[in-house]
Image (tube, rainbow, N blue to C red):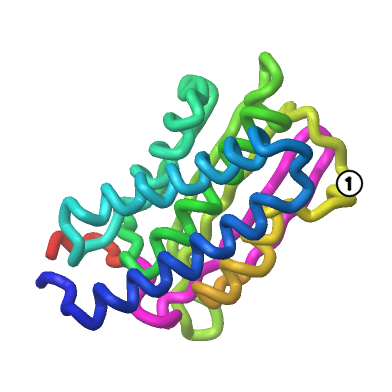
Amino acid sequence: MQPSAADFHRQLRSLFAVLRTLVRQSSQGRNSVADFSAHLEGRIGALARVHEMLMRVPAVGVDLEELVCGELLAQSAPMERCSVGGPEIRIARESAGALGLAFHELAVNAIAHGALATPGGRVNVHWSMRGENGSSWLEVQWSEHEARLDNTMPSHKGFGLELIERMLPHELSARTTMDFPSGGLHVQLLIPQAAATPIWRHGESD
């Protein structure tokens, strides 16, 4: 089933809203036009990759594994030091952009400051479906080991942290946590099945 014209217009409005946020947030704390341009270009590139995935088969959304691996590969991450997997989950088109941006920010941070900036560091990204209080949730765990990060929260909340703490709960009704254990980073995303349209389509081939 192809998306209707109304669905397409809603998707465009959502995209433009995200782009406005990206421009505003990417400019904060930048010391040069080149720095601003690089961060903005990277984030727009992440949205473009999600859009390309969606255009293949719009009705069935985006494969979660492809969404995660796509961002790691886009940052030239050493995939031999990345473990990615879980049950087959498809992210609905209304939710793919926000999640794609979240994985983009996490991948960029891992390369620049986290586990993939050290010779022995590793990134593990795994997900599963779980029940809680009679509801179904998609649980995504992003864990970094042997990273440069210490065990304190950053003093400045950049776009990536704001995205995970505020945008995902707003856009997806998600519950998110971010911890900085010694030598690592752990992010948990809990996304409810009932948020807006179905967030995932588990095992469907539509």
The picture places residue 90, in percent across and down from the top left corner, at 31, 59
Q: Residue at x 74, y 52 (%)?
A: 28
Q: Is residue 53 left or right of residue 71?
A: left
Residue 53 drawn above or below residue 75: below
The image quadrant of residue 121 is top right
Question: Closer to the camera, 193 or 128?
Answer: 193
Q: Is residue 107 left or right of residue 135?
A: right
Badge 1: residue crowd in 10 Å (few <14, some 14–19, many ≥20): few
Which amino acid is tagged 1? Answer: Thr
- Per the image, the residue denoted by label 1 is 152
Q: Which residues are magenta?
A: 176-200
The residue at the far front in this view is 33
Residue 160 visible: no
Q: Residue at x 37, y 51 (%)?
A: 64
The picture places residue 4, in percent across and down from the top left corner, at 16, 78
Residue 12 drawn above or below residue 66: below
Residue 161 drawn above or below residue 138: above
Residue 97 drawn above or below residue 71: below
Q: Say if the magenta span includes residue 88.
A: no
Mark 1: which secondary structure? loop
Q: Is residue 62 left or right of residue 172?
A: left
Q: Quadrant of the C terminus?
A: bottom left
Q: Residue at x 55, y 84 (%)?
A: 133
The picture places residue 176, in percent across and down from the top left corner, at 64, 64
The image quadrant of residue 146 is top right
Residue 180 visible: yes
The picture places residue 158, in percent across and down from the top left corner, at 74, 52
Q: Say if the magenta span includes residue 198.
A: yes
Q: Residue at x 54, y 64 (%)?
A: 20
Q: Quadrant of the N terminus?
A: bottom left
Question: Closer to the camera, 206 or 72?
Answer: 72
